[in-house]
Image: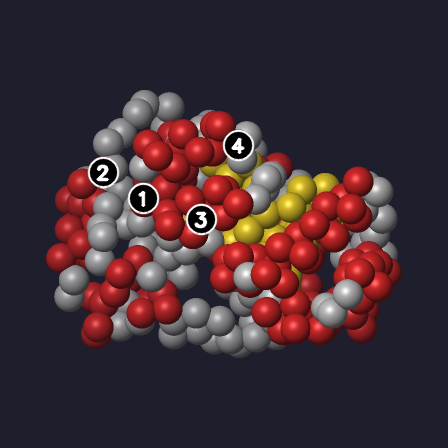
Amino acid sequence: MKINPNKFILGTANLCTKYGIKSTLINESKSKELLNFAYKKNIKILDLSTDYKFYEKIKKNKNIKNWKMSFKVTNKDIKKLKNESDINKFIFYLLKVSNKKKIEYLLFHNPKDLLSEKGSKIFNLFLKIKKKNKIGKIGASVYTKNDIIKLLNKFDLDLIQGPFNIFDQRLKDFRIQKLFRKNKIEFHARSIFLQGIAADKTLLTKKIKNLNEIKNWFKYLSDNKKSAITETLNLINQNSFIKKIIIGARSRKQLKQILSTKIENDKKNYSNFKSKNLKLIDPRKW
């Protein structure tokens, strides 16, 4: 079996720019090719932010009319939002630029912004706009379990987007799972290949490649003749709390490989690969 393409959200942080470790430029032409292929394969949601260069292309070309949006509100955006009028203008500007009637998912990019006094006010105003059916679900993008606990103790969120991959399985924590169930949270997994390093040895830097976790993982793949993409998607599929998967691809060929990968129905135990080493699982530490 394969993962249903409807479960995927196409990440755009790497489109029209260099993004991630040992990255190369994905120009506008290649970005469009990737976008068109994804849409034909039934991926219909884009992960967007004003911090991403691809968003600037959207403003000029308005070329995502048929896509749904998962939009991250950045600190830069929040600094410009001083009152209710500003917030209404901001949301309706996003809708106008992307030629849409609704933002499917609206997320705070940084939990600190939402946890601030200003963040609380903005959240409540977003709720008002949500009631007008201009926003589908409101959530936050997080890095840690503590982010989630703090946010859900204070806000009635619909959605959490967070990292989940072979090395970073922190969000399987029973306390987090309990919070998700209690608050009816929709969870979207990002960084499933940890910016590619869990799938491609050539992306490993000297700082990372000698870590025991990396050595053990690639040894397992080699010894058992396993594909990193297959094993990663098996892991994702085994965790039913993951409702959507943000995937970034560097080319049409790479995305095709991900979408054509067959996964196994049998449960596997991948817990021996998980790590608490932030120098590995948090790209901000690389």
| Marker disc for residue 248 | none
Left or right relative to 42: residue 1: left
Q: Nearer the viewer, mark 4 or mark 1?
A: 4
> Residue farthest to the front?
117
Image coordinates for residue 114, horizontal then vertical, percent: 57, 57
Mark 4 near mark 1, Cβ–Cβ under 8 Å?
no
Mark 2 near mark 4, Cβ–Cβ under 8 Å?
no
Q: In this figure, which residue is indicated by the disc labeled 3?
A: 150
- Above or below 33: residue 38: above
- Above or below 178: residue 279: below
Q: Amino acid at mark 4?
A: Asn
Give the mark nearer the N terminus: 3 vs 2. Answer: 3
- Callout 4: 10 Å neighbours few (<14), some, many (20+)? some
Q: Give the distance between the C-alpha atoms of the residues marked 3 and 1, in whole angstroms.
A: 19 Å
Q: In this orientation, does residue 208 appear?
A: yes
Q: In this figure, which residue is indicated by the disc labeled 1?
A: 169
- Callout 1: 10 Å neighbours few (<14), some, many (20+)? some
Q: Give the distance between the C-alpha atoms of the residues marked 4 and 1, in whole angstroms.
A: 20 Å
Q: In this figure, which residue is indicated by the disc labeled 4?
A: 183
Q: Nearer the viewer, mark 4 or mark 3?
A: 3
Mark 1 near mark 2, Cβ–Cβ under 8 Å?
yes
Q: In this orientation, does residue 33 appear?
A: no
The local secondary structure at tag 1 comes to loop
Q: In this figure, which residue is indicated by the disc labeled 2?
A: 271
Q: Nearer the viewer, mark 2 or mark 4?
A: 4
